[in-house]
């Protein structure tokens, strides 16, 4: 299965918002940029996957960067894995479901991201 996502992929764990919940409790929520990206790409993945699910796979994430800003590929991977689980394409992002992962970054004219899932 091949899925095309919008890019750049924001990090779910960086730039989190801390919101007070009363009595000294606080919760961390992902940034607005991440929430927008997730919602947009959740719809895209649901449409592209058309109900397909993969129980165990090798995943390749190709990310094209259109600028030289510093970004960590592992943060993009975490965001994509969470998206695939939320879309129901993967049952979990644990190693037992995704034992093989390959990340490929390259320069591109426009930001792009392509996920390849190969059942194993």
Image (spheres, rainbow, N blue to C red):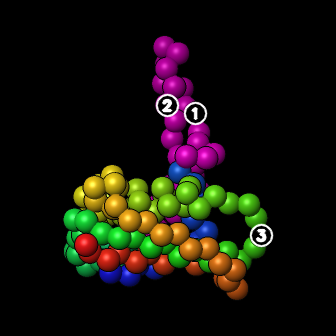
Q: Is residue 36 visible?
A: no
Question: Crowdedness of circle 1 by 10 Å Cα count: few (<14), some, many (20+)?
Answer: few
Quarter occupied by the N terminus:
bottom left
SS class, disc 2 = strand
Q: Is residue 73 visible?
A: yes
Residue marked by disc 2: 27
Q: CA distance from mark 3 to mark 1?
A: 29 Å
Q: Residue 65 versus residue 38: which sits nearer the camera?
A: 65
| Residue appearing at x 52%, y 35% in the figure | 28
Q: Are marks 1 and 2 in contact (CB under 8 Å)?
A: yes
SS class, disc 3 = loop
| Residue appearing at x 69%, y 80% in the figure | 107
SS class, disc 1 = strand
Residue marked by disc 3: 68
Quarter occupied by the C terminus:
bottom left
Residue stretch in magenta: 13-41
Instruction: Answer whether residue 40 is magenta in the image.
Output: yes
Across and down, in percent, residue 87 comes to 32, 63
Give the mark nearer the N terminus: 3 vs 2: 2
In the rendered image, the vertical position of residue 52 relative to residue 15, given as above or below:
below
In the rendered image, the vertical position of residue 97 relative to residue 114, given as above or below:
above
Across and down, in percent, residue 12 comes to 53, 51
Give the mark nearer the N terminus: 3 vs 1: 1
Horizontal arrangement in the rendering, residue 50 relative to residue 28 (left or right):
left
Residue marked by disc 1: 18
Question: Crowdedness of circle 2 by 10 Å Cα count: few (<14), some, many (20+)?
Answer: few
| Residue appearing at x 26%, y 74% in the figure | 119
Q: Quadrant of residue 19?
A: top right
């Amino acid at each position: 299965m091949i899925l095309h996502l919008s890019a750049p992929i924001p990090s779910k764990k960086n730039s989190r918002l801390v919101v007070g919940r009363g009595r000294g409790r606080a919760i961390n929520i992902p940034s607005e940029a991440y929430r927008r990206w997730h919602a947009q790409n959740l719809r895209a993945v649901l449409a592209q996957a058309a109900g397909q699910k993969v129980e165990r796979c090798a995943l390749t994430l190709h990310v094209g960067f259109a600028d030289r800003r510093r970004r960590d590929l592992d943060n993009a991977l975490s965001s994509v894995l969470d998206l695939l689980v939320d879309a129901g394409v993967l049952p979990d992002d644990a190693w037992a479901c995704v034992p093989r992962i390959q990340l490929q970054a390259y320069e591109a004219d426009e930001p792009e991201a392509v996920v390849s899932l190969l059942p194993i």
